[in-house]
Image: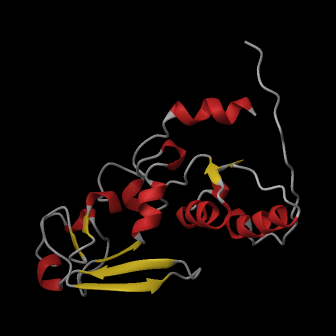
């Protein structure tokens, strides 16, 4: 079978060094839209695969971002001895989170991250966290406050959970996405 020809669209955007790739994805899509060159799929490296970009590219431009999803930089995700966000259970309807030891969050608050991304912040009671036998797997804090957790909104978590072949930060990427990536 003869391989289909590749149809490549290239767009160049120059920025200053501190600007991360993920910060310019929307700008790139806007420029391509103005020239009527929007792709159905946008093949990228991990610098462009933040959950909110996966959502906004699909919602605003009908583009599927294809590439490996960034892993967590948190210390808990770097070894086998910590609880990552995936260790916690989110009950969206009740607006509460259960920790791996079964304790429920006390406060749920919609907020914005430092980069102005929509996030949910939850807090656990100090009375639950301080005596917890597995506390050291959650935090390196001193125990003067209860546990805190910040996570993306539901739409971003759901979409990030299936894009790029990564279900969560602790899993290796599914090589199933690579054949499409390598075709082009």
Q: Which residue is found at the position 51% from the left and 81% from the top?
A: 113
Q: Position of residue 15 (x, y in %)?
A: 84, 70
Q: Which residue is found at the position 42% from the left and 72% from the top?
A: 153
Above or below — where is 73 with respect to 46?
Answer: below
Q: Which residue is found at the position 62% from the left and 52% from the top?
A: 64
Q: Can residue 147 be seen at all in this image of the molecule?
A: yes
Q: Can residue 74 be seen at all in this image of the molecule?
A: no
**Horizontal side of residue 8 vs 64, given as left or right:** right
Above or below — where is 107 with respect to 78?
Answer: below
Q: Quadrant of the C terminus?
A: top right
- Residue in front for this viewpoint, 125 or 30: 30
Residue 3 sits in which quadrant? top right
Question: Residue extending furthest top?
Answer: 1
**Horizontal side of residue 180 vs 77, given as left or right:** right
- Residue in front for this viewpoint, 65 or 38: 38
Q: Position of residue 171 (x, y in %)?
A: 41, 43
């Amino acid at each position: 079978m003869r391989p289909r020809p590749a149809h490549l669209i290239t767009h160049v955007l120059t920025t200053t060094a501190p600007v991360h790739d993920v910060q310019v994805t929307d700008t790139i899509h806007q420029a391509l839209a103005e020239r009527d060159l929007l792709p159905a799929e946008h093949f990228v490296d991990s610098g462009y695969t933040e959950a909110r970009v996966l959502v906004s590219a699909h919602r605003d431009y009908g583009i599927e971002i294809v590439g490996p999803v960034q892993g967590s930089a948190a210390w808990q995700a770097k070894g086998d001895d910590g609880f990552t966000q995936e260790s916690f259970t989110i009950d969206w309807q009740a607006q509460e989170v259960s920790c791996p030891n079964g304790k429920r969050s006390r406060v749920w608050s919609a907020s914005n991250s430092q980069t102005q991304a929509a996030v949910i912040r939850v807090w656990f009671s100090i009375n639950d966290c301080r005596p917890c036998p597995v506390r050291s797997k959650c935090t390196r804090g001193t125990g003067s406050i209860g546990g805190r957790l910040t996570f993306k909104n539901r739409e971003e978590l759901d979409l990030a959970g299936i894009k790029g072949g990564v279900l969560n930060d602790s899993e290796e990427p599914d090589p199933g996405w690579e054949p499409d990536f390598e075709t082009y």
